[in-house]
Image (cartoon, rainbow, N blue to C red):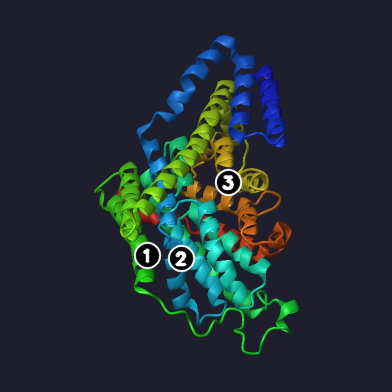
Amino acid sequence: MSFEAVIIVGLAVSLLVYIVLSEQPIWLALLISGGVGIFLLRGSGVLMSSLGTLPFSATAKYSFLIIPMFVLMGVVASKARLAEDVYAVAERFSHRLPGGLAIATILACGGFAAVTGSSVATVATIGRIAIEEMKKHGYRVAAAASIVASGGTLGVLIPPSIILVVYGVLTGESIGRLLLAGVGPGLVSIMVYVLTIIVLYKRGFFTDKKSAAGRSQHAAAPGRQSPARSLTASNYAGTGYIALIFFIVLGGLYSGFFTATESGAVAAALAVVVLLLRSASSPAQFAGHFREAVAETAQLSSMIFALLIGGAVFTYFLVSSKLPMALVQMVTAVDVSAMTVLLLVLLAMLVLGCFLDSLSILVITIPLAYPVLKSLGIDGILLGVLTVKAIEIGLVTPPVGLNVFVVSAAVPGLEPGAVFKAIWPMVIADLIVIALLIIFPGIATALPNMMYG
C-alpha cells in the first residue's frame, strides 16, 4: 500500500467522520466519502463507472429478497397485535418468579423477536405494554424501561435477523447457517438476562423507594403480581401463531425443504395469513393494516438498501486502496494472537455502537475486519454472532443508544439519561454472553454444523 493511498484513505475516512458528525444520513456519508476516495485514487472515469454499476451490482442479488420479506413479516406481525398475546402468556408463566414481570418482558421480547428480526420494532411494540404493567406493580420506571431496551436487542439475534442476513451478504457466509447460528446464543442471552433480573430483584433494583411509602399495603411487590391475569383463547392463539412461524421457518431451513431466501417469503405469507384471520370480521380493517404494512416495509427496506449502496461504494474504495490486504499482511506479520485481534475488533464495535446504528456499524467495519479475522482462522459464522452481540450493546449505550431513545419516547416524562443509568447491569449480562460465546463457540456453531456438516 503506497504512501499516497494512505493519505487518500485518511482524507476519505476524515470526510466520512465529518459528514456523520454533521448529522447527515450514514448512507450519504459512505457514498460521498467513498466517491471522493475513488476519484482521488483512480480518477473521474473510474468514479463515474463505479457510480453507474455499483448501486445495481450491490443490490441486484436474489439473496437480498429475504430482507423486504422479513421486514414485511415483522410489520404485519405487529399489526396483528401478536406482541400483546405473547406478553400475556409470558406473564402468566413467570408471575411467581422473583422479578416476574421483568422476566415476562424478556420472554415476550424473545418471542416477538422471532417474528420481527428488528430490535427497534420489538422495543416499540413490547414497551407500550410492559412498562405500564410494571409501573402498576411498583417497578421504577427507568428500571422497567432498561429491561425493555435490553430485551429488544434480541430482535437482531434471534432468527429471523435482518442484520445477520446483511452480514451474510457482505461476507459471503451462508445465510442459512447464520440464521440457525442465532438460535443458541439467543436462548443463552435470554437465560443470562433472566438470571440477572433475579439477582437485581433480590438486591432491590426494581423498587421505587420514593413511592414505596405511598403505595397501599395491598399493592403487589415488584416482580410478584397476584393474582396472575387470566388468559383468553386469543392470547394462546397469538402465541401459537408466533411459534408456528418460527418453527416452520427454522424447520424448513433445517430440513432443507426451502432455502433461506424462500424462508423469508414463507414467513411473510404466514404473517399475512395471521393478519387476515385476526381481521376476518372486518375486511376493511385488514386492507388498511396490510396497506400500512406494505408502506412501512417499503420505507424500511429502502433505508437498508440505501446503506448497502453507500457501503458498496465505500468498500470498493477500500479494496482499490488495498487497505484490507495491507491489514491482513500487517496482522499476520506481527506476532499477535487471533483472540487479541478479535477482542480489539469487538471493542471497536462497542465504541462505534455509542455513535452509530447497527447496520451502519456493520457496513463500515465488516469489509475491513472480516478478511483480517478470517485469515487468522476465526470462524465466519461465530464472528457474525459475536458482531451482532457487540452491536446489540451499542443499541443501549450512550450517547446514541437507539433502543433507549425509543423506549423513552413511549413513556411521557422519562428521560433517556435515567434509562442509561439503569441499563448497565444488563450491559454486563451481554458482556458475559460474549465471553461465553468465545469460550464455548459451539453455542453458535453446533446447530448450523449439524445441518450443513
Badge 3 amino acid: Leu
Nearer the camera: disc 3 or disc 2: 2
Cα distance in 3D space between marks 1 and 3: 41 Å
Crowding at mark 1 (Cα within 10 Å: few <14, some 14-19, many 20+) = many
Residue occupying the point 55% across, 57% down = 123
Q: Position of residue 173 (x, y in %)?
A: 41, 40
When asked about the image quadrant of residue 31, the answer is: top right
For marks 1 and 3, the one nearer the N-term is 1
Q: Nearer the viewer, residue 321 or 242?
A: 242
Contact between labelled residues 3 and 1, with CB atoms less than 8 Å apart? no
Q: Nearer the viewer, residue 371 or 248?
A: 248
Question: Relative to the observer, which residue lies in front, 209 or 35?
Answer: 209
User: 234 or 30, which is in the foreground?
Assistant: 234
Amino acid type at circle 1 is Gly
Q: Earlier in the sequence, mark 1 or mark 2?
A: 2
x%, y% of residue 380? 46, 43
- Which residue in the protein does label 3 denote? 342
Q: Residue at x 43, y 79 (%)?
A: 230
Q: Residue at x 59, y 41 (%)?
A: 361
- Give the answer, above or below, for where 60 lies relative to 289: above
Residue at far bottom of view: 217
Marks 3/2: CA distance?
Answer: 39 Å
Q: CA distance from mark 1 to mark 2?
A: 8 Å
Q: Quarter of the image containing the N terminus?
A: top right
Three-letter amino acid code of the residue under disc 2 = Glu
The residue tagged 2 is 84
Point out which mark residue 238 bears: 1
Marks 1 & 2, CB-CB < 8 Å contact: yes
